[in-house]
Image (tube, rainbow, N blue to C red):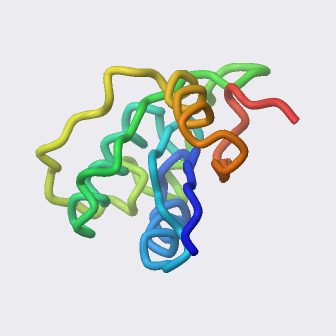
Amino acid sequence: MSHPYLLDCDTGVDDCLALLYLLAHPDVDLVGVSTVSGNVTAAQAGQNTLDLLALAGFADVPVAIGAMDPLAGEFDGGAPRVHGVNGVGDVCLPVAAASAAAESGPEMIVRLAAAFPGELRLLAIGPMTYLEL
């Protein structure tokens, strides 16, 4: 039985691997991805996610761009020494035809939580930007 998941990430090399594992898992129905700044800016993470989803054959998964800065502090410029300037080891992925959703990351989370009440699994692997524990 598959479960709806929303991935909240800062798509660098590590997040690319997590995304591909989720897409391959039979119990996961990836219903959306929201991006935040961390390894790269939220916008670059969004493009990385769109490109990777298209390359993997999942271009229909919506991607929403979140806030530039975390809850506390400001985005510090990422980790280019680890993830490359573009976040994916400076690999040039084919550019996806799809664009990011018009809604923001937080709006996507709220919408999908309402669409899947008590079922949505939120997997937050990037900096906590609009989620608090």
The location of residue 15, given as percent across then percent down, is: 53, 60
* Pick the front one: 88 or 54: 54
Q: Residue at x 16, y 49 (%)?
A: 96
Residue 28 or residue 95, whichever sits in front: 28
Q: Which residue is situated farthest in the right direction here?
A: 133
Q: Quadrant of the N terminus?
A: bottom right
Residue 72 at what x, y percent from top left? 79, 21
Left or right placement of residue 20 versus residue 52 in this view: right
- Residue found at x 59% / y 40%: 38
- The residue that appears at 75% across and 21% down in the rendered structure is 71
As displayed, is residue 113 above or below residue 26? Answer: above
Residue 125 in sight here: no
At x 46%, y 22%, the residue is 104
81 sits left or right of 55 in the view: right
- Residue 76 percent across, percent down from the top left: 62, 30
Q: Is residue 37 shown above or below 25?
A: above
- The quarter of the displayed image where residue 52 is located: bottom left
**Quarter of the picture holding the C terminus:** top right
Q: Is residue 112 above or below residue 96?
A: above
Residue 120 in picture, x, y percent from top left: 64, 48
**Can residue 20 be seen in the rendering of this structure?**
yes
Q: Which of these two is toward me, 79 or 25?
A: 25
Q: Is residue 93 left or right of residue 128?
A: left
